[in-house]
Image (cartoon, rainbow, N blue to C red):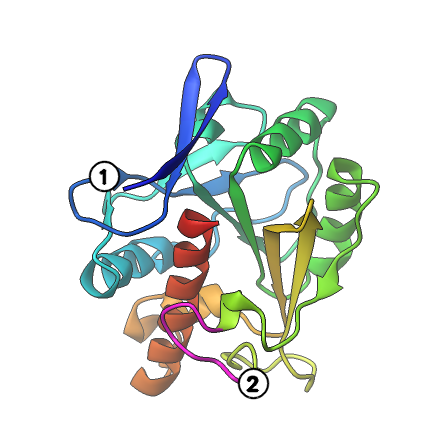
Amino acid sequence: MKYRIFIVGCLILFGSSSFTKRHSFQIAKVKYSGGGDWYANRTALPNLIQFCNNYLATNIDPQDQVVELSSTDIYNYPFIYLTGHGNVVFSDKDVDNLRSYLEAGGFLHIDDNYGLEKYIRPQMKKVFPELDFVELPFTHDIYKKKYEFPNGLPKIHEHDGESPKGYGLLYKGRLVCFFDVECDLGNGWEDAGVYNDSEETRQKALKMGANLVQYALTH
């Protein structure tokens, strides 16, 4: 088994070219400043973790973690998840640390829970001023890792009557951040009774989430 290993300070962040239950790791939700509800989708990550462990043969700790972007703890997580509806503010330390984390091999999934987009775009521009979010083509690996999504993101919840879109930040050819809009992917990971989504809808959301996790661990 081959690993990419990134040493940042005293911490090691690693990704694997294959999945095995012998190697345990954690994923984390991002706690940010600005007043937005970073804590939204409370049951989403535990359900996604269970799905990945069941169907991707991963060994992710079932207890999802919380991490602040300015913390060196961020390097312990190969996959971090940011969601919410409202304002987001990154400090200078957040910006520097997040950029270092993503350059070193980390992966950020931003899930617009409706209303997040206008706040998160300028904050990510501070992280990578030289990059712009680009809409990923449906042929991108993110849509065909474990599960095939030939038409791109599944539509989980209706907001403004627009099609779901998946945007990415590509740093030196590698996708370091995936941003879903008009999709509400994380809502589809929530417990079945939270939104009363059909099981078919929840399965689509979980499968797309599994693709994101698999991509983060193999690129």
Instruction: Work out whether 60 lies above or below 127.
Output: below
Secondary element under disc 1, as helix, strand or loop, is: strand
Q: Amino acid at mark 2?
A: Asn
User: Is residue 213 in view from this perspective?
Assistant: yes
Q: Amino acid at mark 1?
A: Ser
Q: Nearer the viewer, residue 200 or 24?
A: 24
Secondary element under disc 2, as helix, strand or loop, is: loop
Q: Residue at x 26, y 61 (%)?
A: 56
Task: Give the total of numbered labels.
Answer: 2
Q: Which residue is mark 1?
A: 24
Instruction: Where is residue 141? Give x, y as percent.
Output: 52, 67
Q: Residue at x 53, y 70 (%)?
A: 184
The dot on residue 151 is: 2
Q: Nearer the viewer, residue 161 or 18?
A: 18
Q: Quadrant of residue 211?
A: bottom left
Instruction: Where is residue 135? Give x, y as percent.
Output: 71, 68
User: Relative to residue 103, is residue 118 drawn left or right?
Assistant: right
The residue segment tinted magenta is 144-150
The dot on residue 76 is: none
Instruction: Where is residue 59? Give x, y as percent.
Output: 21, 47
Q: Nearer the viewer, residue 51 or 202?
A: 51
Tell me the crowding category of disc 2: few under 14, some 14 to 19, or many 20 or more residues within 10 angstroms, Cα based. few
Name the quadrant of the N terminus: top left
